[in-house]
Amino acid sequence: MNEPQLTPLPLLLVFIPLASAVMTPLLARIHRSLAALTAQVVTAVSFVLACVLLDRVAEVGRVVYWLGNWEPPFGIEYSVDMLNGIVLVLVSFIGVVVSVFARESVASEIDEEKHPFFYAMFLLLFTGSMGIVVTGDIFNLYVFVEISSLSGYTLIAMGRNREALTASYNYLILGTIGATFILLGIGHLYMMTGTLNMADLAKLLPPLYKSRVILTAFALFTVGLSIKLALFPLHVWMPNAYTHAPSAVSSLLAATGTKVAAYVLLRVMFTVFHPNFDLNVIPVTRILLVLASIAILAGSMLAIAQTNLKRMLAYSSVGQIGYIVLGAMLVNRTGMTGALVHIVNHALMKGTLFLAAGAIVYKTGVETVEGLKGMGRKMPVTMAAFTVAALSMVGVPLTVGFVSKWYLALGALDAGMWYLLVVILASSGLNAIYFWRVVDWIYFARPSKELESVPAGEVPWSMLVPTIVTAGLCILLGVQADLPVSLAEQAAGLLVGGAH
Amino acid sequence: MDELILGKYNYWVYVALMMIGFYAVIAKPNLIKKIIGVNIFQTAVFLFYISIGKVEGGTAPIVWDQAVHYDNPIPHVLILTAIVVSVSTTAVAFALIIKIKERFGTIEEDQIRDLRRTPTGEET
Amino acid sequence: MIDILLLTLLVLCALAAVEMRDLLSAGLVLSGYSLLMAVVWTRLNAVDVAFTEASVGAGITTVLLIAALSRTDRGEALVSRTRREIPSLILILLTGAVLVYGTLDMPDFRDPGAPAHHHVAPRYIEGSAHEVGVVNMVTAILAAYRGYDTLGETTVIFTAGMSVILLLRRRKQRG
Amino acid sequence: MGENIIRRTITRLMVPFIQLFALYVIVHGDSGPGGGFQGGVILGASFILYAIVFGSEAGRRRVPAPVTDVLSSVGVLIYAGIGLLCLLLGSAFLDYRALPFKDPHLAGHYGIFGIEIGVGLTVAAVMVTIFFETAHRGEGGETRDG
């Protein structure tokens, strides 16, 4: 591999959203509409920069930036390789899509005088996510976890129902416990190594693998991150949060929040710690494989039982997070590729579904699954996008969902765990049950009386286009899977290349 | 035995404080009591960090010509940041609790759960 | 010896704050707990941190708690305790056991040979004065070596301010 | 009533001294304990004290909401701006040595001075904001007497 390249690109990915978030309330004093516009411009610029950065990473392998020009491990380092390069592109892309969607959606859900602060908070959530992904310093990661968490709690509480408040409060409690565990884990690592730089930790930790301090640190990280990741059985905060948050917020959180946490879990388990630690020192991969399998099945089954559309989607996410963890815990290249591709694919699918759900609320006020009856005639384009994403969730060929499941299944076979195929197939069956029921209602059921009176028609363009774009990508990246898969394979090689 | 107790006493106290705070967070149904628990839970971790930084015979980490050893300043810096995070979380939590009181009329978790089972369709 | 006394007192304060039914009293005990913690930290030579804990933990947090109580309820409701207590206690004992397990391999408290003091820290101790030009090493790290964290920290504060405005500010705010 | 007047007079006398102390703490973080955060908290607390004694209406008249709103942003922007300036002057983000002073120590000194001011402003403004929003109830601006 070439020498890592020093460039301020990674910094700009965090600095621009951060400074803009802080400026948003000031800009909005000049003109109200500048708040929404700032969010759109900033996420778009970040997306372009993230693409440039990924291109650079593909060329040189690793791009770093030393903040304050202090060389690591003495200063804080930003370090981007293929893994976080992909996640940065993903997060910023979803940021663009959701901020375009947000303008009309937020206008209908949030009081106007709160818009400046709302968009500031939206950008802070974005800043936090980007900062978590880009950093190579484990304490800096904690700081940005807190930026994204605090803004996340508040954004969820902005939902219209009073349940949004309790959902936010419960998330705050669990999230704070999770973050405090992570902080304590960092303390344990620091105590034994004297460093906070992730690359430096990776070098210093192997001789300490038998130390009980390090084992405790690992346990603390795993539990803390599992809360943020909403890994079964620590998912309890998520369904209420996603159900009651404003549409734009649930879309952003569902598509990026848990993905960023998944990234951190992979980073800690496979970069800071060596895969051999996970495999040979403690049976953590076994435990997480079991939990992931339960998550996949339980998430899908709970989803079937739901009557609220967003809550159904949230429980489905519990299962999908299980897929990501399952693929990673196979600790082989194919399985990891599947997990990474699924991080991207699930963001696109769940993004589409939550955007469509938001569009339905905007247009008709319908929040229940049953309320979708006959919706196909009222909002044909939105429902087509919804259907594409739903088919992808089931894993129909030519969609992204199929690509993920294909690699996950191959990875399970590579690891000699054929029984995991049963889990994957069973959950696909369960997904088919609840999504087929919905699709059936959308197209073949008679609309309810209230819906009958709503005139047919789509949401405004600014909400429709983002939904179509993500749905289109669910197909495009399912047919042309080479690009995401080859990038994911490279990243997977970085993570589990040396495992045995 | 003395050595064992004195050598680790700070660390055991941090564990004890953490357990007390954690207990309040999960076992107490009052939302404000939970935040008191969160505060104890977090300061316990801060105590752990500050204890790491202490060196036998060290002086406060401010350059001083008669100092032989200094205490490790890194944990101090990290905990300054963490205290700020902690007070920020507390402020947001109180704001949420005030809103919950306004819209549910109570800050007891059990009563809120009962209210949510029988939705009143209450809106702003 | 006095340190052990202080630490034991801390545990008692924490227990009292958690068990008191009157939330105002619990808040005041919590404030005392923070002050005690600040004393402990001063004795551990963490003067900056102690200063902050005294002003934030004992000061601001208490004022906010009282303000919040004035808008909610001061007393904690009596509840049937058994339903939560057993599972909570199991979870807490489990957590405690893991954490104590971790302490077994820790370097002794005050051990100058502990690895944490030998890798990155010496550079800061040596460098604060001549690399940064600041005699308070905590400030040197906070503002220079790890100055970016502090920007993040200031952003956290800003986030908290915006959060509270979003949650609590009323429609008609003149001025 | 007499007690009230005494309390108010003492507060009126004390607040400027507390604020002076806060500024001292903000500025002198490089040589002793303290710094932007601690000083900012004390500065914020001085306004909070004033509001507790004179009521939140009177307190808010001293520091109106738009002022604290703007200052919360300005503080972070000062910090971020100094960082950006170092980047634009050809070095890394927040590398004070790039600032145009002859002596790198002096550059570090002024750079840190600048960011401490930024931190102090944001912290003070946010503390005041949080206090007023938390303590203030309803439209009437009911006073809380401490």
Image (spheres, helix red, strand yellow):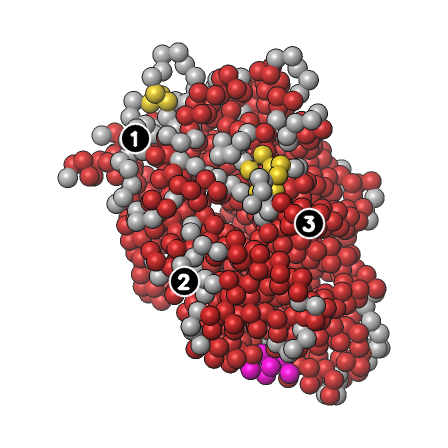
Residue D58 in magenta stretch: no
Indicate the secondary structure of the residue bearing disc 1: loop
> Residues under labels 2 and 1: Cα distance?
34 Å
Q: Residue A285: which disc?
A: 2
Q: Residue at x 65, y 77 (%)?
A: A397
Q: Is residue B115 left or right of residue D68?
A: left
> Residues under labels 1 and 3: Cα distance?
45 Å
Instruction: Indicate whether D122 appears above or below D30.
Output: below
Residue type at the position of mark 3: Asp
| Residue D98, quarter of picture | top right
Q: Is residue C109 left or right of residue A66?
A: left
Query: Which region of the structure is painted magenta?
Result: A429-436
Q: Which residue is mark 3?
A: A55
Q: Residue C113: which disc?
A: 1
Indicate the secondary structure of the residue bearing disc 2: helix
Q: Residue at x 31, y 61 (%)?
A: C90
Q: Residue at x 70, y 71 (%)?
A: A479
Instruction: Indicate whether B98 appears above or below C90.
Output: above
Which numbered disc flags the more N-terminal residue, 2 or 3? 3
| Residue A204, quarter of picture | top left
Q: Chain of mark 3?
A: A
Looking at the picture, tell me which residue is in the foreground, A179 or A89.
A89
Q: Quadrant of the C terminus of chain A?
A: bottom left
Whole-percent x, y for residue A293 in the image:
46, 72
